[in-house]
Image: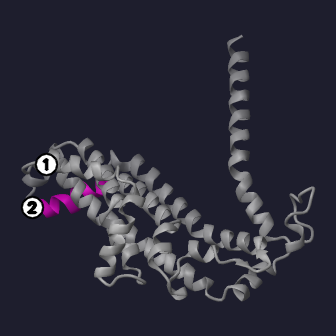
Amino acid sequence: MKSNRKGIHKFFSYLLLTIVTVIVIFPFYWMVVTSLKDSTKVFEFPPQLIPDPVVFSNYVELFKFQPNFPLYYFNSLYIAMLVTVGTGIIASLAGYSFAKIDFPFKGAIFLVLLSSMMIPTEATAIPLFNWMTKLKWINTHLPLIIPPILGSGGIFGVFIMRQYFITIPDDMMEAAKIDGCNPWQTFFKVMLPMAIPALGSLSLITFLNNWNEFFAPLIYLSSDKLFTLPLGLSMFTDQAGTQWNLVMTASVIATIPLLLVFFFAQKQFIESIAFSGIK
């Protein structure tokens, strides 16, 4: 009876997981399928789950319809990478300070930082735009790089890193001090390597958020050559309507870096957890 109950429980568990997996994967499958369809087949009823015929020319037509698409791709890539690296540096240093270093009003300062995360982005859009105008950063990529590192995204990173550094025993710092490490050596050679799991998770979240950012580029950018990928995807519309086959084609190409970053960050995250105790 117990074995039968376990078998039934396992069957329904796998069935539920399969259903959830299909629900999650189907939109991505439909995106890829639509990118391989002719424009006349996109809204065909009943819909084609397997494109017939398969049209690879959409991937060529994409660059003819929007010649600046590779430039949008590059802009999004380097902005997301800079913000990810900058956030990782600032968040790890600040998180370590709040977790392991005693200084006056540490708790109050950290509380103020967390409170600032509750302010909606829309509430600060106009003041921040005026500030960027005075700095003459409008229609440049600087508003898309500096504020995210020092703003809510960076503060979230500080919170993540602080919480992780708190879990590391202070004995590690004492051992490093006995071995002759100064505070900077203790941070870079002892504490930071142990915080790689948190740093990997933070990097993944930061890259995804900045890669998909639409609101800030829409406000600060007006030159077509400075547009990021989300803005570029919004331009696949002409007088005849939206070119959905090209939108899906561009979306497939835009998803590739996200899949790669997620794959490598996840691998690093799992390995870091598995071997952190041994190290």
The disc at residue 106 is 1
Which residue is at a point 65% across and 78% down the rendered structure image?
A: 235
Quadrant containing the N terminus in the rendered view: top right
Q: Earlier in the sequence, mark 1 or mark 2?
A: 1
Q: Amino acid at mark 2?
A: Asn
Which residue is at a point 29% across and 55% down the rendered structure image?
A: 158
Identify which residue, 12 or 122, lies in the foreground. 122
Image: magenta residue range: 183-195
Residue 256 figure quarter = bottom right
Which residue is at a point 46% across and 59% down the rendered structure image?
A: 204
Secondary-structure class at tag 2: loop
- Image position of 34 (left or right of 154): right
Residue 144 position in % (x across, y down): 41, 73
Q: Is residue 218 above or below residue 156?
A: below
Q: Amino acid at mark 1?
A: Lys
Name the colour scheme: one colour
Give the labeled residue for mark 2. 182
Residue 48 figure quarter = bottom right
> Is residue 189 in view?
no
- Image position of 12 (left or right of 139): right
